Image (spheres, helix red, strand yellow):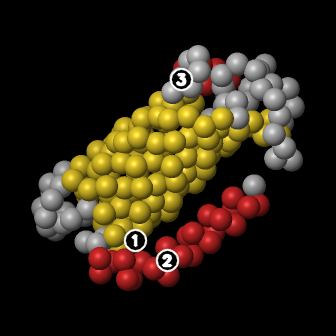
Amino acid sequence: MKVVSKSFAALALGMLVGAPAAHAQGAEFSLGGGATVPLSDYGDATKTGFHGLVAVSFAPSSFPLGIQIDGMYQRLKFEEAVVSGDRSSQILQATGNLIYKFKSSEESQFRPYLIGGVGIYNFKRVSGDNVATPGTGNTGNTGTDFGLNGGAGFDFKAGAIGLFVEGRFHNVFTDGSDNKFIPITLGVRLGGN
């Protein structure tokens, strides 16, 4: 967990330092976090957890379609009936997405958007001391799988800095039943047009 925390902190610092140069090129950097809500069979096995997000996006101001590459760290505790003790499901993911930004007036600070794409997801069962443990079923065994995601959000822009709120449905194709969850993210965007 310390390595992940330090990695996110280093990435966040790098994004803050590089934001002025990226602003000139139209790149937008995002940092966020929030709750991850598990669904379906995955929701039966785990409780609502938390996540952190880092992303970079490129969207020309004259065209509504852009791209976003993001990474997310998520952690959800297992239900006591599924796994005894202090055990969690950890998800590391990287996704590539298309973003469609709805047209709004030049003076509008509220900008809704749709986002969706593909990704790679690494699931790992961990205990409180971050040691891998064997699992049963298909609710977060250690492994890497592909998935799809799609959702919507809105930006509230104020110059080169803005806030965003976003919800995305993720469906990860695993053996047996797919793992499904919705991260709800609140964050800040730096740069962009």
Mark 2 or mark 3: whose residue is earlier in sequence? 2
At label 3, the amino acid type is Asp
Mark 3 or mark 1: whose residue is earlier in sequence? 3
Q: Which residue is mark 1?
A: 190
Whether 58 is drawn above or below 191: the answer is: above
57 with respect to 91 (left or right)? left
Would you identify the image quadrant in which residue 111 lies?
bottom left
CA distance separating discs 2 and 1:
8 Å
Give the image location of residue 49, x and y in percent: 64, 40
Q: Nearer the viewer, mark 3 or mark 1?
A: 3
Would you identify the image quadrant in which residue 121 lies?
top right
Q: Which residue is mark 2?
A: 16
Q: Residue at x 40, y 71 (%)?
A: 190
Q: Secondary structure at mark 1?
A: strand
Mark 2 or mark 1: whose residue is earlier in sequence? 2
At label 1, the amino acid type is Leu
18 with respect to 90 (left or right)? left
Whether 106 is drawn above or below 144: the answer is: below
Q: Nearer the viewer, mark 2 or mark 3?
A: 3
Q: Which residue is mark 3?
A: 178
**Crowding near the residue tagged with mark 2, few <14, some 14–19, many ≥20 C-alpha atoms within 10 Å:** some
Q: Are marks 2 and 1 in contact (CB under 8 Å)?
A: yes
Q: Secondary structure at mark 3?
A: loop
Numbered circle sitting on residue 96: none
CA distance separating discs 3 and 1:
34 Å
84 with respect to 118 (left or right)? right
Q: Are marks 3 and 1 in contact (CB under 8 Å)?
A: no
